[in-house]
Image (tube, helix red, strand yellow):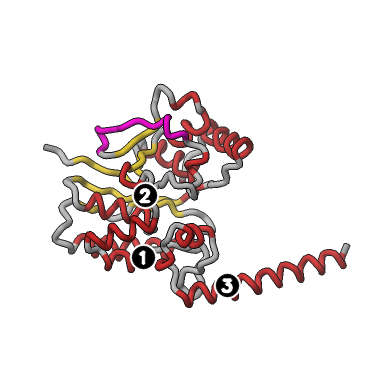
């Protein structure tokens, strides 16, 4: 019997890594995907995390899935889709949805003709929960223990449906906090994996900064262990000087005017 193929967005972060670990214990073929976003300073950190964790899982005797090398794709090679752009603009205007990564993922999934798993939580801190009504999701057993936008009910929320209709949402992550993910990975014996997870948008000296959105979200959900004290301290100092510099620039602009 042909193994189920799972196409998953993997950033090297906690949520997607949790899902990859979970899948590694199932009879399937895992194909990770990673979009190289212009100007993102953490690409190297994230790809290093993915590479290191792949090596750990491939050498683990509990891994029964076939874990393929990550498929990277430059953002500049994405096709444009007018309906996806319009949907994102509508969500941005009406619901103040600012996560620009999701229209990119929607374009990627359509261009590649994939049903793409995403490690998304529907927690109170999650941005997706603001625009995707849980009642618009249905089980999708042909792709495993995941859910997808209801093809009948989903279109009633046209903008959200357009962005997420090719996405698959793992049930295991649905309402799980990052703290719970960490505890479960530890209980499974994947401490080595946890040490390689990357969770920061604005690193300082190669460490998570503790003050960007990703770090603050992790800490808010009880995953402060992901941010080292040195990184948090240096990140705070850097943030302080950035604010001083910005204030100084405003003063200079005021004088110039």
Q: Relative to residue 112, is residue 238 depicted above or below?
A: below
CA gap between label 1 and label 2 equals 26 Å
Q: Earlier in the sequence, mark 1 or mark 2?
A: 1
**Residue labelled with disc 1:** 48
Residue 74 part of the magenta-drawn span: no
In the rendering, at what x and y percent does residue 205 appear?
A: 49, 75
Q: Residues within 10 Å of mark 1 (few under 14, many from 20)?
A: some
Query: Which residue lies at the image location 31% right of the left edge and 46% below the top edge?
Result: 172
Q: Is residue 191 or residue 110 the one in the foreground? A: 191
**Residue labelled with disc 3:** 236
Q: Nearer the viewer, mark 1 or mark 3?
A: 3
Asked if the residues shown at circle 1 and circle 3 are in contact, with their CB atoms under 8 angstroms apart, the answer is: no
Q: Which residues are magenta?
A: 133-144
Q: Secondary structure at mark 2?
A: loop
In the rendering, at what x and y percent does residue 245 appear?
A: 71, 71
Q: Nearer the viewer, mark 3 or mark 2?
A: 2
In the rendering, at what x and y percent does residue 21 appear?
A: 26, 55
- In the picture, the disc for residue 176 is 2
Query: Which residue lies at the image location 37% right of the left edge and 53% below the top edge?
Result: 15
Q: Secondary structure at mark 3?
A: helix
Query: Which residue lies at the image location 54% right of the left edge and 65% below the top edge?
Result: 211
The N terminus: image quadrant = top left
CA gap between label 3 and label 2 equals 29 Å
CA gap between label 1 and label 3 equals 25 Å
């Amino acid at each position: 019997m042909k193994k189920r193929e799972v196409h998953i967005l993997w950033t090297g972060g906690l949520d997607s890594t949790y899902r990859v670990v979970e899948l590694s214990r199932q009879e399937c073929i895992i194909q990770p995907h990673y979009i190289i976003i212009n100007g993102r300073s953490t690409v190297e950190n994230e790809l290093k995390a993915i590479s290191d964790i792949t090596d750990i899982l491939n050498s683990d005797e509990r891994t029964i899935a076939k874990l393929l090398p990550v498929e990277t794709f430059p953002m500049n090679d994405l096709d444009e889709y007018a309906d996806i752009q319009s949907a994102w603009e509508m969500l941005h205007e009406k619901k103040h949805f600012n996560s620009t990564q999701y229209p990119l993922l929607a374009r990627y999934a359509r261009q590649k003709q994939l049903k793409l798993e995403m490690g998304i939580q529907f927690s109170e801190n999650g941005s997706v929960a603001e625009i995707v009504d849980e009642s618009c999701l249905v089980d999708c057993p042909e792709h495993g223990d995941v859910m997808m936008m209801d093809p009948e009910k989903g279109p009633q929320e046209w903008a959200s449906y357009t962005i997420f209709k090719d996405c698959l949402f793992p049930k295991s992550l649905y309402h799980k906090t990052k703290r719970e993910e960490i505890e479960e990975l530890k209980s499974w014996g994947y401490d080595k994996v946890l040490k390689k997870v990357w969770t920061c948008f604005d690193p300082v000296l190669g460490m998570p900064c503790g003050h960007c959105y990703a770090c603050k979200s992790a800490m808010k959900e009880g995953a402060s262990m992901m941010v080292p004290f040195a990184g948090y301290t240096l990140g705070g100092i850097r943030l302080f000087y950035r604010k001083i510099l910005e204030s100084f620039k405003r003063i200079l602009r005021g004088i110039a005017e």
